[in-house]
Amino acid sequence: MIVAGSVAQRPHHGGHAWVFLQYLLGFRRLGFDVLFVDRLDPGMDADESNVAFLAALMKRFGLAESWAVLLDGGREIAGRPRSEVVEMARRSVLLLNVMGYLDDDEILAAAPLRAFLDIDPGFGQMWHELGLADLFGGHDRHVTVGKGIGGRGCSIPTCGIDWITTLPPVELSEWPRGGEHDDRFTSVVSWRGPFGPVDYDGRRYGLRVHEFRRFLELPAQTGERFEVALDIDDGDRADAESLERHGWMLADPRAVAGDPWRYRDYVRRSAAELMIAKNLYVDTRSGWFSDRSACYLASGRPVLAQDTGLDGFVPSGEGLLTFATLEEAVAGVDEITGDHPRHSRVARAIAEEHFAAGRVLSRLLRELGVE
């Protein structure tokens, strides 16, 4: 089982690393040999430390021989030799290419089954329809965490593709419920992220910043503590100052979540998560659910999540609560703090039933036709 993605490119983003680890560890638990394939191209602001970060991470999870990084357009490679990577692709049952990050023609051609995995639903589809980029070509099947895509209520174009939808998996053994926590609602997020807004079909679809500003009054209206490990550019200093004036605490994401272990500790020390989504996810009714929120649920930490069209895809009301307005967010905070032990128990139960990697990945493989 080959998973292709971009951990080495972002060595100080613990939550980003967990996205790929959940798949690798989940497939391994199902009995597959796994290989992670990454790439670092010229101009990616990378040096030896990027590869060293990935090598150390994989070793810590018992995957020391299960990775490769393509360097300089694939002319060089770290980790497993190129010939072995190609041979493993040839013997694989599936190559899962996250966001189409792997673009090496030889490795892709060797794999009998190539599936594109969309973890940022809406962006790639709109770029495709606008003629800006085609991430989807060269794949046999297409998978998305946008559970609403293809449904009547979702405005994300399908691009003529028969999308398989899935929830993000979480390897429960790595996220035990319980442990000490404080009283903060937290999250680990980027203010804007790598992509800008998208103008499509007469509308502008924005980013997390455009939603977050709608909920600035939440600390004042609830009296609770809210802390965000916020990746925000110096150019958005005015927004950071506005958050602090409104009672939000800001943490340095590299300090509290710069590797998978600090990220996990940060999640598990929290009382609950406040999940504010990207505007595109919300306005399109994408049905997107955060891989980060799945980690909070697995840890027995209730999640108060902005609604992206989740009705019917995951249970809500206990353990996981959704909101669309400031008033609904305030009510959700009051509900969670009013009976935190109950919501904690239900949060873990939701993770076990709906997000456990063994369940999610087994279901995905069946839909892909993989034994």
Image (spheres, helix red, strand yellow):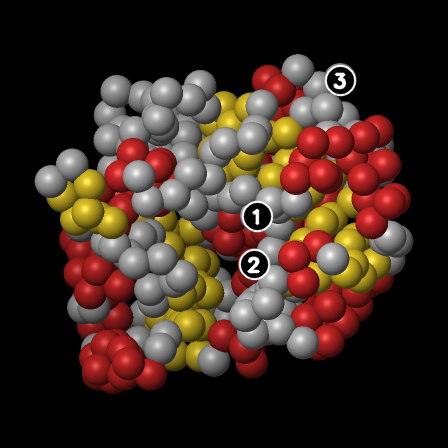
Question: Which numbered disc, 2 or 1, marks the residue closer to the eye?
Answer: 1
Whichever of callouts 1 and 3 sits on the residue coming sooner in the sequence is 1
Choose between 271 and 55: the one closer to the eye: 55
Which of the numbered marks, if any, corresponds to residue 101? 1
Mark 2 and mark 1 residues within 8 Å of each other at the beta carbon: no
Whichever of callouts 3 and 2 sits on the residue coming sooner in the sequence is 2
Residue at the spot x=74%, y=48% of the render?
Answer: 36
Q: Is residue 230 found left or right of 82 in the rendered image?
A: left
Q: Secondary structure at mark 3?
A: loop
In this figure, which residue is indicated by the disc labeled 3? 371
Q: Is residue 268 above or below residue 161?
A: below
Specify the amino acid type for callout 3.
Answer: Glu
Quick one: quadrant of the N terminus?
A: top right
Question: Which numbered disc, 1 or 3, marks the residue closer to the eye?
Answer: 1
Residue at the spot x=21%, y=82% of the render?
Answer: 238
Choose between 104 and 356: the one closer to the eye: 104
Q: Secondary structure at mark 2?
A: helix
Specify the amino acid type for callout 2.
Answer: His
Q: Secondary structure at mark 1?
A: loop
Which of the numbered marks, if any, corresponds to residue 246? none
How many other residues sit within 10 Å of disc 1, few (<14), some (14-19) or many (≥20)?
some
Separation of residues labelled 3 and 2 (CA atoms): 28 Å
Specify the amino acid type for callout 1.
Answer: Tyr
In this figure, which residue is indicated by the disc labeled 2? 16
Residue 179 seen anywhere in this rendered image of the structure: no
Residue 59 seen anywhere in this rendered image of the structure: yes
Q: Position of residue 266 (x, y in %)?
A: 56, 69
Q: Is residue 133 found left or right of 18 in the rendered image?
A: left
Residue farthest along the front direction in this orientation: 75
Q: Position of residue 10 (x, y in %)?
A: 58, 66
How many other residues sit within 10 Å of disc 2, few (<14), some (14-19) or many (≥20)?
many
Separation of residues labelled 1 and 3 (CA atoms): 25 Å
